[in-house]
Amino acid sequence: MVQDLARSRATDLIPEHVLAHVPGYASGELTARAARLHGGTVNASFRVDTSAGRFVVRIHDPMAQTLGANHEREAQLHAAAAAAGLAPALVHVDPEHRFMVMEFVAGPVWSTQDFARPERLVRLSAALYSLHSVVPPAVALFDIPAVLAAHHERLAAAAPDERRWLAKLMRRADAALAESGTHGRPKVLVHNDLYHSNLIGVERLYLLDWEYAAVTDPLFDLACVLAYYPQATAYADTLLEASRLAPVATPAMLRQATWLFVLLSYFWYRSRRLAGPSPTRATDAAEQALLARLG
């Protein structure tokens, strides 16, 4: 990364109208170095170093909105999380939501292996408890049935021969939603995309990439972890206890919420395929793994 920053002028990677909002950047001068950051499957993120500090620029791909992202909501919820010390501080949010600039935070990025380590899951759960305790700004609630229905409609139109199977999944989703007990829990600020590259630090944990953040049932953050990382399933009780959700959510409820999140993730990958990008070996493998868990 350091070598990339030493070689790359920021203007080689990032449009100048975006760089204008990075502290310390001056047009026409060699005042910023940049490097592409790995992670993420839709948007493009860059680290930018200037005399004023280190920053991250994320340039949004319009496809993200098709897949359910809401950058206006993201900016509000990210700011609330940053005020609570759980996310990098925002520096600039483009009024048209084409890009955003935030502070760069250093630290070890989590790996998939961390989700089989109970001490790491306890740390994550504690951070989630803090997040769920933040008073969220006034945004529309996350409507998971509506999101699933939008994906279902798109997929059924593209694959008519799968309509019966897709309808069966949607019926099961209705039952899982009821059995998850979601309607009985207060709606809170959730991250909703706890992929390992979105977690930085150990003692001080930062959550990155708030594109799918929402106000909804706190159990969905735990369901997200178990949907993305089945190896954490053995520690489901630990997650419930450490996040302080055990009094209001049973392991059976978490299993139903996890199935819903597996379905949501599978639909996301299928919709992404329809949106145009060629699937990679990694996205193909992720999609097939999710499909196998739908039963």
Image (cartoon, rainbow, N blue to C red):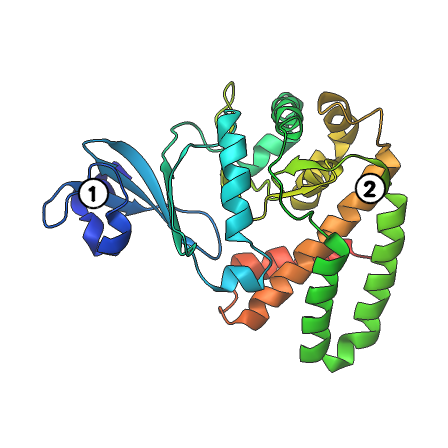
Cα separation, mark 1 vs mark 2, equals 46 Å
Farthest-out residue, left:
29
Does dot 2 land on a helix, a strand or a loop? helix
Which mark is drawn over residue 33?
Answer: 1
Using the rendered image of the protein, determine whether residue 211 is visible from the camera's viewpoint. no
Residue 147 rendering spot, x and y as whole percentages: 70, 59
- Give the quadrant of residue 25: top left
- Give the quadrant of residue 269: bottom right
| Residue 158 vs residue 85, the one in the foreground | 85
Farthest-out residue, front:
138
Q: Which residue is mark 2?
A: 182
Q: Is residue 18 left or right of residue 141?
A: left
Q: Which residue is at 53% across, 25% downward?
A: 84
Image quarter of the N terminus: top left
What kind of residue is marked 2? Thr
Q: Which residue is at 70% across, 66% downward?
A: 150
